[in-house]
Amino acid sequence: MDFFDRFAIPHASPAIYASMVAIGLTVIAIIAGLTYFKKWGYLWREWLTTVDHKRIGIMYLISALLMLFRGGVDAIMMRAQLAVPDNKLLDAQHYNEIFTTHGIVMIIFMAMPFIMALMNFVVPLQIGARDVAFPRLNALSFWLFFMGAMLFNISFVIGGSPDAGWTSYFPLAGTEFSESVGSNYYMIAIQIAGLGTLMTGINFITTILKMRAPGMKLMKMPMFTWASLVTNAIIVFAFPVLTVLLAMGTMDRLFGTHFFTTTNGGMDMLWANFFWVWGHPEVYILILPAFGIYSEVISTFARRNLYGYKSMVGSMVIISLLSFLVWTHHFFTMGQGALTNSIFSITTMAIAVPTGVKLFNWLFTLWKGKIEITTPMLYSLLFIPTFTIGGVTGVMLGMSAADYQYHNTMFLVAHFHMVIIPGVVFAMLAGLTFYWPKMFGFMLNEKIGKLSAWIIATSTLLAFVPMFFSGLDGQARRMYTYSESTGFGPWNMVSFIGAAGLAVGFALIVYNIYYSTRYASRDISSDPWDARSLEWATHTPVPEYNFAILPQVKSSEAFWDAKKHGHELFQGEYEKIHMPNNSGVPFILSCIFFVWGFSFVFSLWIPLILTTIGIFVCMAYRSFEKDHGHYITVAEIEETENNLRGA
Amino acid sequence: MKWVLLTFIFTIATVLTGCEPLMVLDPKGPQAETQAKDIMLSIGIMSFIVLVVFAILIFMLTKYRASKQSKDYEPPHIEGNIWVETICVGIPVLIVIFLSIVSVQSNNIVEATPKGYGDKEPLIIYASSSNWKWHFSYPEENIETVNYLYIPTDRPIEFKLYSYGPITSFWIPQLGGQKYAMSDMVNTLHLAADVPGEYMGRNANFSGKGFAENTFNVKAMSEDKFDDWVKEVKKTAKPLTEEKFAKLLEPGHLGQSTYTGTHLEFLPPPEGENGGHNHGSSHSSKAEKHDNSSETSSESEHHHQ
């Protein structure tokens, strides 16, 4: 094998060289900083080996925000390239790589960890548990995700990014038409991250079903916990499909099998089917936790209980079932005939009903409320109209005959950005601002927060509404350039301005974090928002064991009722608490997985064999390890509790 | 909230005052017309829903803001209301049922010979894509064109779509929606043009580097003129040989060209006995030759270290 060819930078462009230098300098700066401030031990003991769900949540959050900016830079470059006709900023190959990585990074490495961040941090607290069911597995999930993300992110400086679209349809993604290692990165990086996600799914289903506080029946769970339960059920059913699909794709690319090729009986439609059997439920894996966040935020700041709790739960369960029955609408134009298209057209439009139910329930939660507009609430209120536009255009896309005209156009791009950005990103930003005080012990600045919410919402409209029109005017997605005579120019210019606005909005959020870290008051109560569920019943910062005494739950708004009706949440005496020990194994195992993945991408068989052995050694070590955790004594608990109360 | 509304209204207004109609909403054939009607109908119904949501939201926000209420107001605990919830489910259900009926009907219309054209013999055109070109074979007329398409008006046209590489999508927005062209099966797309004119056609499905320029011109003309053009081609164009076609298939962009004869004779499309999903046994020796050559090239690159 010619090593130089394989490792060569495919785009010997100044931008790539600059990125390489930037990456190198950042790594050096981090290593130097850690050494200078003698933080290696701290990093290892407190973070890399942690099994605490709260810290894992925060690490997910940091990764998600980093990836948001990586994917955002891709987005800006794309919009800049298309802003004017016949632009020469990027060439076709570079553009193809950018929209491919933008899609993957945003869906798999930004939105997924963002929901995982909130799920990890909030769910155990919300159900009154001390941790997740399998804390060490949880750490492994995070590190596998993280290593998958890092492996994917080095692709553009070593060997080349994937360039066949985030859907990576074969035969285009096969070796015949996509010769660089880019698509190998796609197959293996997502595989590693996906394994982590699947483990999270199992972990959280167990946690929610088995570890709820006494008295918390299923129908008394807070809505975010319900959303998480349903989401993780979807994960457990959908992700194995992705695992198998990526394994088949890897075999096609590396071992010359012909599952999806154009020759020897390969079937390109099989990829499309499998991809969307995972891909469509994935959309709901992202949106349902977001719906959970909105439910929490809206009922908190309307100062009212959630309207239609039962129908909220019911609609989520129905959405989760329907999400598996609609995948064919992603390729109405593949020639399966009017009957099949009609069936999937109906199931697709049917999803609008439970989604509409949720929307109306939020609107009626405002009814007779006492609405206070804080930053998280502002995001939730801005979500309603923008998401409605995205949602109704989804119904339009569901009409199969009309879809022949929308398919593969900017109309589609506009639709899914108008649901994912207000749906998922706004929710995550709302959740970030809402839970920030619980995570870090101070509030984010409200003024800057609201300003960024307004800028992000208006920029979203500005960036994506024009695409509805350019799509109807015949602009296909993924075109790196167009001529002036097409008339797409003005639409794309407006989109570019919107994209720039989004960049400003996100930069403001970073500024807000910086500003609040420096100037915000540390003197906040454990319940700064006057909220309703159990996560606010414990101290800020949350002690390692979450609750000194497990709470007794009587309603779906346990903490609110405790505050208003004087229910006693914490009854009984302190007892010693059993907690899991920290472990370096998840981190080390994931590092080995990183090397394993890298070897796979470049077909380096010897390192691949060695790392495979390493993976099994780690698993064997774990299975012979005698680690039964430790106890926190009553004296320690008393000391912690007294300190926190004093703080 | 006002900003959002204003931006939305502003954008809509800009469009409505725009001078040229959007391509998809400016149909020149019966299939595109069915689709444009569906689109306009759904835009109407969906605007209604959007307005209802906006109205409720604005009402709630103006009436129930904390700043407009007394300090000691305690919001009540409301579980839900069977009537409100029935309406919130019922109306969307009715809308979805109505749209489903429209959708199913329209899908059957666009998948069949265009309405009002039933009594005419359809013109069959094989449209195949290769990186990054379109090849149009007219088997009846025994001619072939590259990157442009002449069609008669007032006659149904049956496109047979397939590909010599990645999945592509054949799309002439003003005549009707698109369909995929794939290497292992032939898809049929029924279109027709009512009005003579020139239309934009393109591959709408991403197929690699040359995708953006993967377009073709469509010219619709009266049947007489079309017949004249066919005669002219037969007189002037060179025959399409196997070697010539193999050259055309090489990746890259080409201008327009015209040939007598079609490639269907020496390189049959993946239909019938050459059809896809044959799982290993290719009946066409020529096709096999083509397959093998591409396969060895990929093998040599990735399996010999």
Image (tube, coloured by chain):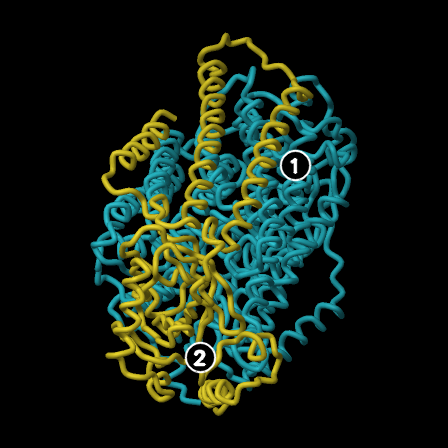
**Location of mark 1 (residue):** A315
**Can the viewer see residue A514?**
no
Residue A529 vs B232, above or below: the answer is above
Identify the disc placed on residue A589: none
Which residue in the structure is indicated by mark 2?
A: B264
Q: Amino acid at mark 1?
A: Ser
Residues at badges 1 and 2 in contact (C-beta under 8 Å)?
no
| Identity of the residue drawn at 62% across and 53% down | A339
Identify the element where label 1 is drawn.
helix
Residue visible at 37% across and 59% down? Answer: A478
The residue sitting at 36% across, 33% down in the picture is A454
Q: Quadrant of residue A45?
A: bottom right
Chain B rendered in what hue?
yellow
Residue A305 found in image quarter: top right
Q: Callout 2, which amino acid?
A: Leu
Task: Work out whether disc 1 and disc 2 sit on a shared chain.
Answer: no
